[in-house]
């Protein structure tokens, strides 16, 4: 393993449903995807990044841990080009809430049915409320929302599922969620 995970990455790993295939969007150094696959939480995975530098760092981590046969590296923008019908969990973490929403919206525009049974684990660094509103508008239900503090920084993780129809936020407000 590449060393101990931060509290933020550990919280994401604990929320992922075990088994199956996971895509780590914005994989950066590869610590999370390597932990998930190396520990058996996920059977295999995709490590994706839009930039060559972080993906190269991820490749070094994957290679050093001997996980090349289980983790496929993809230089891609968001979820573009991934076999979404084969992916059970998508993690998008460490980006702004609006960027995360744009990534999901682009995927839904191309292949809505592929996200129906997929667990979405989202960890926005900013604009949580905008991500939440966008998820509802796009037809996603928020199943769990977890906030915690690590040092001086506050983090929120949203576990969502695509249900195919917009969620009425007035109804949620009336129920007190």
Image: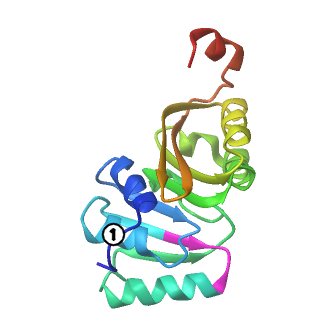
Q: At 53% from the left edge and 38% from the top edge, which residue is drawn?
A: 160
Across and down, in percent, residue 93 comes to 56, 59
147 relative position to 169: left or right: left
Q: Residue furthest left?
A: 40
Badge 1 element: helix
Query: Which quadrant does the N terminus fall into?
Result: bottom left
User: Quarter-wise, where is residue 115 in the image?
Assistant: top right
Image height of 86 relative to 47, above or below: above
Foreground residue among 64 and 4: 4
Q: At 51% from the left edge and 56% from the top edge, which residue is drawn?
A: 91
Q: At 46% from the left edge and 76% from the top edge, which residue is drawn?
A: 30
Instruction: Inspect the magenta stretch and tell me whether residue 50 lies in it.
Output: yes
Across and down, in percent, residue 49 comes to 61, 73
Foreground residue among 104 and 28: 28
User: Quarter-wise, where is residue 153 in the image?
Assistant: bottom right
Q: At 50% from the left edge and 72% from the top edge, which residue is drawn?
A: 47
45 relative position to 121: left or right: left
Instruction: Inspect the magenta stretch and tell me whether residue 176 lies in it.
Output: no
Image height of 91 relative to 64, above or below: above
6 relative position to 162: left or right: left
Q: Which residue is under mark 1? A: 35
Q: Residue furthest top?
A: 174
Across and down, in percent, residue 109 comes to 73, 46
Q: Residue furthest front?
A: 152
Image height of 72 relative to 157, above or below: below
Foreground residue among 132 and 66: 132
**Magenta residue span:** 47-52
Across and down, in percent, residue 66 comes to 30, 86
The colouring scheme, among rainbow, by chain, secondary structure or one colour, is rainbow
The 10 Å Cα crowd at callout 1, few under 14, some 14 to 19, many 20 or more, is many
Image height of 118 relative to 22, above or below: above
């Amino acid at each position: 393993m590449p060393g101990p995970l931060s509290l933020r990455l550990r919280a994401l790993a604990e929320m992922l449903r075990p088994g199956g295939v996971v895509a780590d969007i914005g994989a950066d150094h590869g610590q999370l995807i390597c932990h998930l696959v190396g520990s058996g939480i996920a059977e295999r995975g995709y490590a994706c990044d839009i930039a060559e530098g972080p993906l190269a760092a991820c490749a070094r981590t994957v290679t050093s841990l001997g996980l090349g046969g289980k983790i496929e590296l993809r230089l891609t923008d968001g979820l573009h080009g991934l076999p979404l019908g084969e992916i059970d969990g998508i993690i998008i973490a460490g980006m702004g809430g609006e960027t995360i929403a744009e990534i999901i919206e682009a995927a839904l525009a191309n292949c809505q049915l592929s996200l129906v049974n997929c667990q979405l684990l989202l960890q926005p660094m900013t604009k949580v409320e905008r991500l939440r509103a966008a998820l509802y508008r796009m037809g996603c239900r928020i199943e769990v929302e977890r906030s915690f503090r690590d040092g001086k920084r506050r983090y929120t993780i949203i576990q969502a599922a695509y249900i195919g129809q917009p969620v009425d936020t007035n109804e949620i407000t009336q129920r007190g969620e």
